[in-house]
Image (cartoon, rainbow, N blue to C red):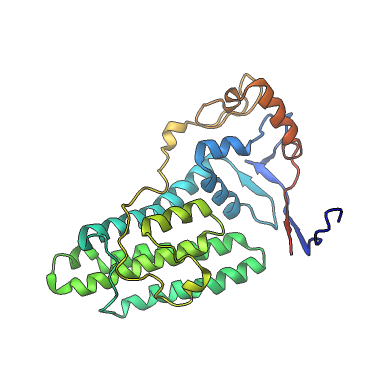
Amino acid sequence: MALDLPMPKKIFGHPWVLFGNDKMSKSKGNIVYADDLAEEFGVDAVRYYFLHEIPFSSDGIFTYELLIERINSDLANILGNLVNRTIAMAHKYLDGEVCAPEVKEDIDDELISCVLSAKDKVEAYMNECKVASALDVIFDIFRRSNKYIDETMPWVLAKDPEKLDRLKTVLYNLLESIRSGAVLLQAFLPETADKIFKQLNTENRSIESIKEFNGFDSGIKLNNPEPLFARIDKEKFGTIKDITDKGYYTNSYHVDVREKIDAFRKLEFESKFQTISSGGAISYVEIP
C-alpha cells in the first residue's frame, strides 16, 4: 500500500516441508539450506523436485535419496536422454537439418494428440494449484516421445533409402514434440527450457506456437546435442547419518556443506533462514 501497488488477489500457502518424517529444527540439526542444494544439484533440479513433490494440500517430504531418484529418473532419463538422442539422430541421419514432414502414418496421431492437448491440461491444473499434475502432463509429452522412438525405430528407417521421407517425418515429429514440451516447461524450469531451445536453434518459444503441431520451421540447422542433466551415482553418495558428531545433519554424500561457509556467512544464513529452520511454512503470492 505504501508503494501504491495493487494488493494480492490470492494468497496460497502449503503446510510443512519435512526432512524424512521429521520437521526441520535447529535442535534436531536437520536443516536443509536452499543455496547448498542449488550449488550441488543445480537450480532447476531442485526447483523440479520441490514443485513436483511438495503439494499445497499436505506436508511434503525431502530427502537426498528422493531428490537423486527424481533427477535420475525424470530429468536425466526421460527428458535429458530424449533430447540428446533425438538431436544426435537428426545430426547423424539428416546432417542436423529440420525437414518438413512428408509421410504421415497412423502411429503419429497419438503423439501429436498428446502434444496438442497438453496446453489446456496444464492451464486447468495450474488454475487448481495442482503443480505436480501440470508437470506430469508436460513430462507425458517426453514419455510419449520416447515410446514413439521405440515404435518408429529411426535407425531402421535410416538403412532404407526409400524410407528417407518417413525418417524426416519421424524426426520432425520428435523435434516438434520436444519444442512444444519446452514451451510449457519454461514456466517451471526456465534454465533447462532455454538449453533445449538453444540446442534446437529456435526462438519460437511462445505459447501460441503450440496450438498447432507445425511450429518448427523446416530448414533450421540444429546445434550439437549437450547433456541437460547428468545421472548421479547413489553409491557415491553413501548413506545418510542421523546425527554427526558435530551435532548437525550432513548430506548423504558425506560432504559437510557447512564447512564451505565461513563464520560470517553461517551467521548470515542462520538469520536469513530462521523461519524455515524452525519449520515455518512457505507462502506464495499471486500479484494481479
Residue 170 vertical placement versus 6 (above, below): below
Q: Quadrant of the C terminus?
A: bottom right
Tell me what residue is drawn at x 55 percent, y 40 percent. Answer: 38
Residue 78 vertical placement versus 66 (above, below): below
Q: Is residue 169 left or right of residue 163?
A: right
Tell me where residue 275 appears, x and y as whole percent.
Answer: 76, 39
Query: In which quarter of the view is residue 268 placed?
Result: top right
Camera-side residue of 246 and 3: 3
Tell me where residue 84 appears, x and y as whole percent.
Answer: 34, 53
Q: Is residue 32 left or right of residue 41?
A: right
Tell me where residue 75 appears, x and y as whole percent.
Answer: 45, 51
Tell me what residue is drawn at x 67 percent, y 20 percent. Answer: 263
Tell me where residue 82 appears, x and y as whole percent.
Answer: 36, 57
Q: Residue furthest top?
A: 245
Q: Is residue 233 left or right of residue 247?
A: left
Mark yes or no: residue 28 visible.
no
Q: Quadrant of the N terminus?
A: bottom right
Residue 7 vertical placement versus 214 (above, below): above
Tell me what residue is drawn at x 31 percent, y 80 percent. Answer: 106
Tell me what residue is drawn at x 76 percent, y 43 percent. Answer: 280
The number of callouts visible is 0
